[in-house]
Image (spheres, helix red, strand yellow):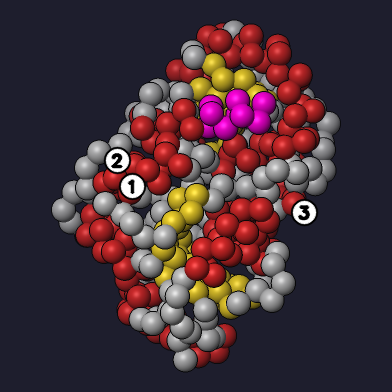
């Protein structure tokens, strides 16, 4: 099977999905991205074609990739943004199109209403309508999206699990404490404003280290003032090794928010791949998963985290056993099953 992955910034979920699909004999993957700043992805993916972030330019690039590397059996698009889906549909009118809905604007807003009028909202609605099948990061995300859009299309829940070759790559000397990797913000994004939470943990003598997805002098200053150590941005492979230094990884938000309660984020699986248990706070879907696999502690309040840290080492054996159950290759099997179920042909 020949698969074309189309993504905007070649996010880690797209990388994991592509690697999971590539594990199956006879499968080829070509990736298109507007940018890819992470060296791990550039080295790991067998082929990447870059395009200029413009709908018309993307169409020309898609046509060239189709002519040189096709025909393709499936085109698999990762949002956000959603406008590339429309370009793909124009060029690959007769090829099955799979949309990975892991970052919908409607879900960031709580999933209770369609996105507002305007280009962003129109792209989301049109992209979902154009897709032949859908992939979601969690069951809650799928249920909320299906209810909002009245969906009956084929769909799969695919976790953002780590390729087996990157699980437990290298365990570095432990320095202990709690680690958080992912987006950090100020009050502009309330569900990513961890400053008060980290300040509370610092006062309780719980060391917190952060590996944010982006750095700015203001972010370093504000989170440093909250008592957290803000680390520089590193490659994904280096991140997995660095995470092994800590006692536990934090999953969940500083406040109750639908975005977190629906999420099954990359960080959950990255912590486990690094060999460390997790502490879950205000993230219902993650909490159910962690309890099911016994790979960490679920807390009700930030003030419960210091006690959880005292008990967290008992979960390390369960983390090691977890890797046999969930990895990018096992999740790739779900994607391959979805591809196989899609009727229709191949673009010439």
Looking at the rendered structure, which numbered label has been put on residue 165?
3
> Where 79 falls versus 140 (above or below)?
below
The disc, 1 or 3, on the residue closer to the chain's N-terminal end is 1
Query: Could you tell which of marks 3 and 2 lies nearer the N-terminus?
Result: 2
Label 1: state its secondary structure: helix
Label 3 to label 2: alpha-carbon separation:
36 Å
Q: Is residue 80 left or right of residue 214?
A: left
Q: Judging from the image, what secondary structure is the residue with disc 2 in?
A: loop
Depth check, mark 3 against mark 2: the one in front is 2
The x and y percentages for residue 259 are 39, 36
Provide the major secondary structure of the magenta segment. Answer: helix
Q: Is residue 224 visible?
A: no
Q: Mark 2 near mark 1, Cβ–Cβ under 8 Å?
A: yes
Q: In this rendering, does residue 140 appear at all?
A: yes
* Residue named by callout 1: 145
Which element type, helix, strand or loop, lies under badge 3? helix
């Amino acid at each position: 099977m020949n698969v074309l992955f189309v993504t905007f910034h070649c996010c880690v979920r797209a990388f994991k999905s592509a690697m999971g699909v590539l594990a199956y004999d006879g499968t080829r993957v070509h990736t298109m991205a507007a940018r890819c700043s992470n060296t791990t992805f550039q080295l790991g993916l067998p082929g990447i074609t870059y395009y200029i972030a413009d709908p018309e330019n993307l169409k020309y690039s898609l046509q060239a990739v189709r002519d040189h590397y096709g025909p393709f059996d499936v085109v698999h698009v990762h949002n956000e943004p959603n406008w590339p889906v429309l370009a793909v549909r124009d060029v690959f009118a007769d090829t099955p199109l799979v949309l990975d809905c892991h970052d919908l604007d409607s879900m960031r807003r709580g999933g209770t209403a369609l996105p507002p009028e305007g280009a962003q909202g129109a792209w989301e609605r049109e992209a979902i309508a154009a897709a032949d099948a859908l992939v979601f990061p969690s069951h809650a995300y799928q249920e909320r999206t299906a209810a909002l859009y009245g969906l009956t299309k084929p769909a799969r829940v695919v976790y953002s699990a780590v390729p087996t070759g990157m699980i437990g790559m290298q365990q570095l000397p432990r320095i202990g404490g709690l680690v958080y990797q992912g987006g950090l913000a100020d009050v502009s994004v309330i569900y990513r404003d961890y400053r008060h939470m980290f300040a509370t943990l610092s006062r309780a003598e719980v060391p917190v280290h952060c590996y944010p997805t982006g750095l700015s002098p203001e972010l370093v200053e504000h989170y440093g003032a909250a008592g957290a150590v803000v680390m520089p941005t590193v490659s994904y492979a280096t991140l997995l090794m660095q995470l092994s230094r800590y006692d536990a990884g934090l999953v969940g938000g500083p406040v109750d928010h639908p975005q977190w309660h629906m999420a099954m984020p990359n960080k959950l699986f990255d912590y486990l791949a690094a060999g460390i248990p997790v502490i879950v706070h205000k993230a219902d879907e993650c909490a159910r998963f962690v309890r099911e696999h016994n790979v960490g502690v679920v807390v009700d309040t930030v003030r419960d985290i210091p006690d959880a840290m005292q008990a967290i080492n008992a979960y390390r054996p369960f983390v090691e056993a977890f890797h046999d159950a969930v990895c990018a290759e096992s999740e790739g099997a779900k994607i391959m099953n979805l591809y196989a179920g899609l009727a229709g042909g191949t673009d010439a």
